[in-house]
Amino acid sequence: MNDRLKELADAGVSIWLDDLSRQRLTSGSLQALIEDKHVVGVTTNPTIFAKAISDAEAYAEQVSRLAKDGVSTDQAIRVITTDDVRNAADVFKPAYDDSEGQDGRVSIEVEPTLAHDTAKTVEQAKLLWDIVGRDNVFIKIPATKEGLPAITQTLAAGISVNVTLIFSLDRYKAVAAAFLAGLEQAVENGHDVTKMASVASFFVSRVDTEVDKRLDAIGTDEAKALKGKAAIANARLAFEAYEAIFDTDRWHELETAGAKPQRPLWASTGTKDPSYSPTLYVDNLVTKGVVNTMPEATIKAVEEHSQITGDTVRGNYAGDRKVIDDLEKLGISYDEVVQVLEDEGVAKFDASWSELQDTVTSALKGAAK
């Protein structure tokens, strides 16, 4: 039997799971994914935790205890989620050690409501880092304009960061600049940068969802021919930018100090259009030195259907630029699309936080009866 996931890992793609729950931790299913599916990291978000808490009895005892203690909803969320992340970080400690800190990482997000508040984002990033208390944790910070200085300040404090919600190439370049500034300040502040790491999470499928909707509205054969191409082109051009940024004297000086590059992470890689291959955003974004974080359904699809043919990112950046240019010629503005996606992304993050608050509030009320 072909081990397609191993082929993907051998091609240089770190496979991370986009999911976490108490049940995964206690049942051994997370450990099984590590052992059998080559999973070497985990990303989380409020929606993932809301689903976990609403679906599982695994939290009942802890929720009951928290209700008895009279904690607030937000306090309960912090205790529950940081406990899961801490325990998951312990599960991934061997992967962290084996990869010298590149993998074996577990991400936890600052409250999405803080996306436009630099100071409070940094404050909460430090709080979450201290509460979890594990070197192999990433604090997720969104790549809003206000998030950029928060990224720098958090890294400067010696805290590893997963920068999330990146859509545009210009914003990605600003994220990389914030990363470099943060590491330089971390060195100045006496932190051991050999223990630090970061990823830049580029959202993939949502680009096609927005662009394809606009192509369908145009409806010409020329428009239809561009469907399903924008997201992959955008991600590949981000990798082109990554190659340039991390081949500069500024970076090499940090590298000499033991710093690791901020790896691109492909997020939102489950396909939204059922007519597309379920592994579209995996098979076409294979290259050495990246992360692909997937829901378990996509991991299974890769295992069953992927054709890993080597590097599918490098080598045709001109063709990728042509995709973006052809969209512009049809009247689809790249700048407008990525701004819409960022605005929607922040709104979706806010909605998912509200969902998590509602879920935990109901659980606490139920436990208090």
Image (cartoon, rainbow, N blue to C red):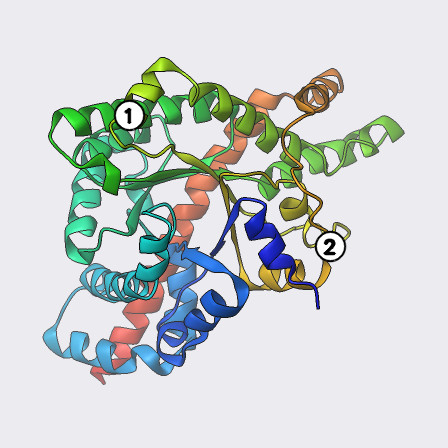
Q: Classify residue 124 by image quadrant.
A: top left
Which of the two labelled residues, at mark 2 and mark 1, occupies the earlier sequence position? 1
Query: Which residue occupies the extreme right position in the image?
Result: 221
Q: Is residue 23 above or below residue 191?
A: below
Q: Nearer the viewer, residue 12 or 239?
A: 12
Under tag 1, what secondary structure? helix
Q: Quadrant of the N terminus?
A: bottom right
Q: Is residue 206 above or below residue 42?
A: above
Reading the image, the residue beneath label 2 is: 274
The reply, left or right, for residue 181 in relation to residue 235 is left
Reading the image, the residue beneath label 1 is: 256
Q: Name the amino acid, label 1.
A: Thr
Residue 341: where, in percent of width, then height? 53, 35
State the residue at coordinates (37%, 57%): 95
Q: How far apart are the alpha carbons under marks 2 and 1?
A: 46 Å
Q: Quadrant of the C terminus?
A: bottom left
Q: Residues within 10 Å of mark 2 (few under 14, many from 20)?
A: few
